Image (tube, helix red, strand yellow):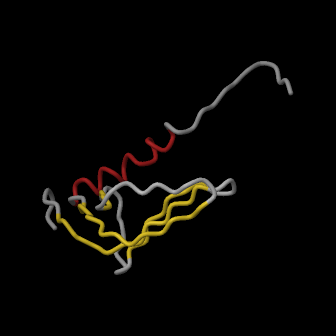
Amino acid sequence: MGLLTKEIERAPCTVEISHCFESLHAHVRFNNGAVIYPGDEVKVQGPEIMAPFGEVVSEDREAVIVRASKLEQLWTRLTGDFEVMELCEFSFSEEVTL
């Protein structure tokens, strides 16, 4: 992988979708041990997975991983903290009410 070039990798994966009262999540586990680094993009192949309320659905799929170039990895590491701060909301007021 060069300074400006990207690589494409395919990996078998397991997708788990939970649509329960206790947990609402979607997780992807790579079955071949692939690791995702800052700046990498992952696209899971196949049709949309819908889990009915109260159920957990697990399916085996293939994922396409587009590896970030060295320059993109560096940029993501340098600016990642700023992007996380966009998720935070702060409020300052003179009086406290409960």
Q: Closest to the observer: 63 or 78?
A: 63
Q: Closest to the observer: 21 or 71?
A: 21
Point out residue 8 in the picture as x, y percentages from the top left corner.
19, 65
Query: As displayed, is residue 70 above or below residue 81?
Result: below
Q: Quadrant of the N terminus?
A: bottom left
Query: As displayed, is residue 53 above or below residue 30?
Result: above
Q: Is residue 30 left or right of residue 55?
A: left
Residue located farthest toward the bottom when viewing the structure as drawn: 32
Q: Give the residue drawn at x 48%, y 69%.
A: 58
Residue located farthest toward the right when viewing the structure as drawn: 98
Instruction: Tell how many labels.
Output: 0
Q: Give the residue drawn at x 51%, y 65%.
A: 57
Q: Give the residue drawn at x 24%, y 59%.
A: 68
Q: Is residue 84 left or right of residue 24?
A: left
Point out residue 48 in the picture as x, y percentages from the top left corner.
37, 54
Point out residue 91 in the picture as x, y percentages from the top left corner.
66, 27
Point out residue 33 in the picture as x, y percentages from the top left corner.
37, 79
Residue located farthest toward the front when viewing the structure as drawn: 52
Q: Quadrant of the C terminus?
A: top right
Q: Closest to the observer: 12 or 94?
A: 12
Q: Closest to the observer: 38 or 27?
A: 27
